[in-house]
Image (cartoon, grey):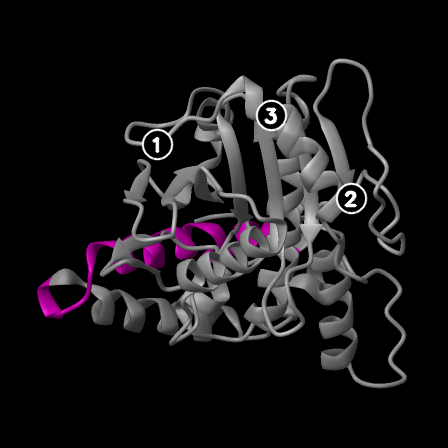
């Protein structure tokens, strides 16, 4: 079971409130175990999830340990969440040139959604307190998970070297989602979506599906639309659109070939990102050194960042 804030908690898997008694928890586990068994129409994945949930909170000792555990990744070590995206590089030396504020907009959205959910006048001492994060609705937890995913992606990009330039939290149009990252390097120009839905995803009929996605949600279509708007406004062409998710949410890279003006789309585990940005991927049209300097000026002059 993923430790992502977006993942279902053991209580959610078992369909109970964190305040239930041990006996109520035991009855819920037995019921879910029967309902999720593959022999009665359940799935192996859901049956396994129920078993893992019970392992984590089934005994008083394990339940107490879980209830007292913290989300280690929710502590942000970067710039203040109140700061606005900057057009100045955020790293120097041999690291990639970095512009903007990765994860900043998503963290602001998380904080705004959390305050609205908590209610007007409610004082929140620590918006990242583990008990508060766990008790929030899943769509709020997803926003925090997305912020963490964007920050993790930016950290990987920064280590690529001075031959790469990255922009984060890029505005497209008011009615269209932002682009999380744009990366320019010897292998080409990439638009990147950093995500963490808390559950595995797979490609089905040209779109990503999974238990963590809301009904009717079409992340690939929305991402491609935002990239198309940005590419048109800057008069550039993306080498590929890359969706990055935690390793446990997708086993192997999956891809959609280029179609018309839409570039190739690849969905990859986070551990494969550096390799893709450095070497490309099979079927991907590589860029050229000659275009990198020209494109960098175009992007630097044309990119605009989202407002917090």
Q: Residue furthest top?
A: 94
Is 149 placed above or below 293 here? Answer: below
Q: Is residue 20 above or below residue 290?
A: below
The answer to whether 269 appears left or right of 305 in the picture is: left
In magenta, the rendered stretch is 39-67
Q: Which residue is mark 2?
A: 76
Q: Nearer the viewer, mark 1 or mark 2?
A: 1
- From the image, give the main secondary structure of the stretch colored magenta: helix
Q: Is residue 143 visible?
A: yes
Dot 2: within a 10 Å radius of its alpha carbon, few (fewer than 14), some, or many (20 or more) residues? some
Position of residue 304 measured from the top left corner of the image (x, y, whole percent): 75, 53
Sequence order check, earlier mark of 1 and 2: 2
Which residue position holds label 3? 292
Q: Tell whether position 29 is magenta.
A: no
Question: Residue 96 sits in which quadrant?
Answer: top right
**Structural distance between the alpha carbons of marks 1 and 2:** 35 Å
Residue 271 horizontal/vertical position (percent) = 47, 29
Give the alpha-carbon distance from disc 2 to disc 3, as whole Å. Answer: 32 Å
**Mark closest to the chain's N terminus, 1 or 3:** 1
Q: Which quadrant of the rendered structure holds the C terminus?
A: bottom right
Residue reaching furthest to the left: 39
Horizontal relation, residue 207 to residue 22: left or right = left
* Residue at 50% from the left image edge and 57% from the top image edge: 228
Between the C-alphas of marks 1 and 3, the distance is 17 Å
Which residue is located at x 82 percent, y 50 percent?
85
Tell me the element at label 2. loop
Taking the magenta stretch, the answer to whether it contains residue 46 is yes
Question: Residue at point 67% right, 29% down?
Answer: 165
Residue 284 circle label: 1
Q: Position of residue 191 (x, y in %)?
A: 53, 44
């Amino acid at each position: 079971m993923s430790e992502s804030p977006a993942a279902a908690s053991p209580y959610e898997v078992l369909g109970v409130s964190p305040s239930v008694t041990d006996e109520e928890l035991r009855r819920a586990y037995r019921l879910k175990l029967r309902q999720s068994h593959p022999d009665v129409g359940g799935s192996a994945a859901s049956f396994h999830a129920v078993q893992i949930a019970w392992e984590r909170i089934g005994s008083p000792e394990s339940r107490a340990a879980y209830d007292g555990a913290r989300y280690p990744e929710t502590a942000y070590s970067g710039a203040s969440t109140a700061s606005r995206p900057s057009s100045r590089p955020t790293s120097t030396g041999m690291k990639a040139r970095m512009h903007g504020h990765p994860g900043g907009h998503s963290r602001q959205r998380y904080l705004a959604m959390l305050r609205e959910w908590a209610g007007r006048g409610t004082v929140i001492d620590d918006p990242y307190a583990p008990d508060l994060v766990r008790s929030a609705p899943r769509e709020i937890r997803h926003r925090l998970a997305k912020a963490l995913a964007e920050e993790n992606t930016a950290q990987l990009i920064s280590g690529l070297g001075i031959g790469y330039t990255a922009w984060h939290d890029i505005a497209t149009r008011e009615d269209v989602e932002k682009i999380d990252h744009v990366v320019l390097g010897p292998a080409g120009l990439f638009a990147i979506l950093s995500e963490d839905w808390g559950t595995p995803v797979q490609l089905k009929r040209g779109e990503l599906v999974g238990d963590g996605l809301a009904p009717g949600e079409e992340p690939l279509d929305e991402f491609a639309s935002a990239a198309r708007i940005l590419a048109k406004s800057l008069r550039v062409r993306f080498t590929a659109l890359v969706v990055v998710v935690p390793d446990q949410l997708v086993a192997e890279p999956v891809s959609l070939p280029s179609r018309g003006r839409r570039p190739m789309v690849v969905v990859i585990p986070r551990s494969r990102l550096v390799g893709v940005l450095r070497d490309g991927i099979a079927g991907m049209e590589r860029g050229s050194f000659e275009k990198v300097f020209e494109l960098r000026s175009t992007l630097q002059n044309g990119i605009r960042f989202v407002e917090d």
